[in-house]
Image (tube, rainbow, N blue to C red):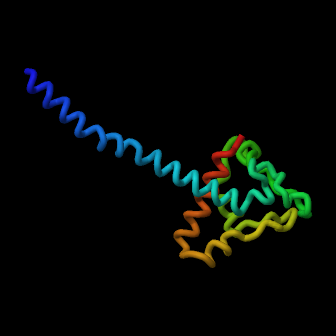
Amino acid sequence: MEQSLIHRCLTIMAALPIALAISSTASVADEVEKFEGEYEFTTYCATCHGLDGKGGGPVAEVLKTPPSNLTSLAKENNGVFPYERVFAMIEGREVAVVHGREMPLWGERYSSEVKKPIVRARILELVTYIKDIQQ
């Protein structure tokens, strides 16, 4: 009996690192995606939209059209974050007709740097980050 208990304890101890690695894989991937999206936002969006995403970046006051408050997109869309619309706006497929467009076409910038699947992934990470800052 004592040897059986020792054997079970050793088996559990041996399996524990594997179980922890499997359970943490999803959270590590989520954190990497969040970090990448936050980096993209801070690097390319915060100058106009502000670090908090509310539209008060250092360049905002010189623009003809004030930058959008990106933290209220879901609220303005009946509580549903408009993933496709935000993606299309960043990529350049959708243009704000009413005010024109001062926002750069980031899709073109991304596509000049890397291959298309990577471009879409970077934009998706950015959109996911914007979704995460909704209030």
Q: Nearer the viewer, residue 49 or 134?
A: 49
* Image spot of residue 44 (x, y percent): 71, 63
User: From the image, which quarter does the C terminus lie in?
Assistant: top right
Q: Nearer the viewer, residue 71 or 81?
A: 71
Residue 108: name its quadrant: bottom right
Residue 18: name its quadrant: top left
User: From the image, which quarter does the N terminus lie in?
Assistant: top left
In the image: residue 8, left or right of residue 15? left
Q: Residue at x 91, y 63 (%)?
A: 62
| Picture layout, residue 80 above or below residue 41 | above
* Image spot of residue 39 (x, y percent): 63, 57
Residue 80: name its quadrant: top right
* Image spot of residue 107 (x, y percent): 66, 70
* Image spot of residue 134 (x, y percent): 69, 44
Q: Residue at x 89, y 61 (%)?
A: 65
In the image: residue 21, left or right of residue 34? left
Q: Residue at x 74, y 42 (%)?
A: 75
Q: Farthest residue in the top direction?
A: 1
Numbered label tally: 0
Q: Farthest residue in the bottom direction?
A: 112
| Picture layout, residue 6 above or below residue 38 | above
Q: Residue at x 75, y 45 (%)?
A: 72
Q: Nearer the viewer, residue 123 or 95?
A: 123
| Picture layout, residue 96 above or below residue 71 | below
